[in-house]
Structure formats: C-alpha cells, structure tokens
Amino acid sequence: MSNPLTGAFTALVTPMNRDGSLDLGALDALVDAQLAGGISGVVPCGTTGETATLSLEERDTVVSRVVKRVNGRVPVIAGTGSNATNVTIENQKRVKDLGASHALVVTPFYNKPTQDGMLRHFTAVADAVDIPSVLYNVPPRTGIDLKPETVVKLAQHPRIVAVKDATSDLDRVTVTARGVAKAFAQLSGEDATACAFTLMGGHGVISVISNVVPRETAEMIAHAVRGDAAKAREMHAKLRDLCTALFWESNPIPAKAALSMMGRLTDALRLPLVEMTAPNREKLREVLRAGGWI
C-alpha cells in the first residue's frame, strides 16, 4: 500500500483583492484547478499562503473554505507552525476542528531552539492534539535546521507522519530513510530538486510551481515515484525555467504574478511583500509564453 502522503501537494497561494481582503472565489477556483490537474493534496496557510500576514480569523476562513471545496477528495495539510509551542498547539486544535486532515508544523523561527528544544517542541505539539503532523524544515526562512537525526527521533511518534524538507540536501533522503519506518513520508520543499529528491526515495513534493502548472507537476512526481527516471527528467527539463523564475523574488510574489498573467487571480499581496518588479515580470511572461501556459 502506498503512503497516503505520496505525490505532488500544492502549497496554495492566498488570493486577495486589491483592497487586501481575501478573494474567496479565486481561492475556490484555484482549488478546483488543482484537483482537476491531479494534485495529490493541498496545503493552505503555509509560507506560500502569506500566513505571517493573515489574522487568525482569516486563517480559519481559508482553511475551512479549502476543506469545504476539497470535500474529502485529497488531504488538506493546514499550516499551524509558530515559534511558541503553546500557540502551535492552539493552532493544531483549530485546524483539526475545521476539518483539516493534517497539520504542517514549521520549525520555531527567530528564537533558534537547539535540536533538543525542537525535539521537545514537536513532541509536545503531537502529544497535545490528535491530528497527523508534517514536520517542516526550511532553514533559509527560519534560521534553524532540523537535523536528520532529530527527524528520525520524532518519526517514532505515531502522530508525526512526514517531513517537508526544504534544504535541497538530497543526501538527507537516504540518511533519514535508514532510521524511519516505511510509512513515514519524506516530501521535498524545493521545486528545483523535487524530481531528484523523489527519485532518491522521497515520496513527492509540497510545491509552489503547481499553483501555476498542477498537471505537469503531478505528472513529473508520478513518474519519479514509479521510478521512471527518463520520463521524470523529461518533465523536469520542461519545468526547469519556471522553477527558477518563480523564485527570482520572494515566494509567493512570482507565483501570484504568473497566476495573474494567466487570468486566475490578481497579484495583490500584503506588505511587506510587494508586486514583482517590472523587469522580472517581463522575463516571467516570456517563460510562461515559452512553456505554452499563456
């Protein structure tokens, strides 16, 4: 039996109107496009969803709206992470009550805990709330690195079922796999290396580019999961320039710009994020044209 967290999962952008309010109609349409494209699951209120700028009420609205739209067809992995353990526990309770199937729990940022501190943090969160959790390690954003040996220890907890690894260190796939049960999923958090990560034994990706190209991303990861390296590499080559372009500026600035060019939503963001610079916008437009996406 395959792991339930296998495939391509979309880290959803949060559509907004020009006045800064949530665009829930565009969110519904975005979720519909992901499901139509064969995406294995969706991830609201993560980094890509600008969660740091959303109020608690807005986060609840986004998660509940996504859960309702998905209607049980794929996992909904809702972001809950904080740099305070008690706040993270409260966030876990909220997304469970809202119907999310899993929680995405980022490493505590800014206060820079030790490995033992992170071990205790994630354990306390998992002990407190009965919802499967996905560890999220993204050192460039948080300033700390959840080491493979700590992941292995945490994987022994029955409610900690996966890790999203955004380090681009492909050796970690093998190192971590040696110490965890087969049921524990390893998901890439970097689109540029997701194909290689999966071919190395990972279970897939939590993706930014799949907001824009869900079908192609899902196909690439499906080939990689099956071990069809030739077809997976072929899809990766097609998506390579888009992977690069969507990180020319801080995520999700380019992703929203691309979706705006495709007529899917506006490229409105919350400060301190601002719209994509004109030169990069034009280069992104050329990448989308070259790929046949606009």
Image (tube, rainbow, N blue to C red):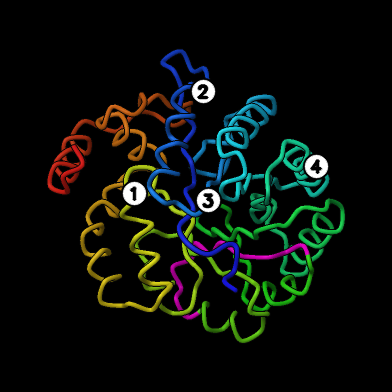
Foreground residue among 64 and 268: 64
**Which mark's residue is nearer the viewer, 1 or 4?**
4
Q: Is residue 91 left or right of residue 22?
A: right
Q: Give the number of the disc on residue 93.
A: 4
Q: Which residues are magenta?
A: 159-171
How far across and how far down the image is residue 137, in percent? 58, 61
Q: Is residue 87 above or below residue 29?
A: below
Q: Residue furthest right?
A: 128
Residue 169 among magenta residues = yes
Residue at image x 65%, y 74%? 183
Q: Which residue is mark 3?
A: 41
Q: Is residue 116 above or below residue 190?
A: below
Label 1, label 3: how many angstroms apart (C-alpha)?
Answer: 22 Å
How far across and how far down the image is residue 116, in percent? 77, 69
- Of the numbered discs 3 and 4, the one sitting upstream in the chain is 3
Give the secondary structure at mark 3.
Answer: strand
Q: Quadrant of residue 231?
A: bottom left
- Of the numbered discs 1 and 3, the one sitting upstream in the chain is 3
